[in-house]
Image: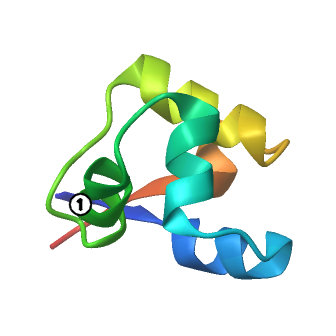
Amino acid sequence: MSLKNKLKVLRAEKEISQDALAKAVGVSRQTIVAIEGKDYSPSVVLALKIAGYFNKSVEEVFSLSEK
């Protein structure tokens, strides 16, 4: 199983950069790049911060894929 996310779509809708999102949730831009590229699964705390930033539930941002 792998973790999918909708970060690129949500960022595009809000018209924010990876850097702006990273600063808002307290991580580096490289962390956002890795999450978007599915190379890194965020901690529960970071997933909650990201979901909260977009005013979404964690399940609306992240989901499991059977891969």
- From the viewer's side, name the closer residue of 10 and 23: 23
Q: Residue at x 32, y 26 (%)?
A: 43
Residue 16 drawn above or below residue 21 = below
Residue for point 37% across, 54% down: 29
Residue 6 visible in the current orientation = no
Disc 1 target residue: 34
Query: Vertical placement of 47 versus 3: above or below?
Result: above
Residue occupying the point 23% across, 66% down:
38
For the C terminus, the quadrant is bottom left
Picture quarter containing residue 52?
Answer: top right
Horizontally, residue 21 falls left or right of residue 4, namely: right
Q: Is residue 40 left or right of residue 54?
A: left
Look at 32% across and 37% down and name the residue there: 42
* Number of other residues with Cα within 10 Å of mark 1, as a class: few under 14, some 14 to 19, many 20 or more: few
Quarter in which the N terminus is drawn: bottom left
Q: Is residue 12 left or right of residue 29?
A: right
User: Residue 7 location in percent, x, y?
Assistant: 55, 66
Residue 61, x across and y down, in percent: 60, 54
Q: How is the image coloured?
A: rainbow
- Say if residue 9 shows up in the picture: yes
Report which quarter residue 25 is drawn in: top right
Q: Secondary structure at mark 1?
A: helix
Quarter holding residue 49 = top right
- Along the viewing direction, whichever of 17 and 38 lies nearer the viewer: 17
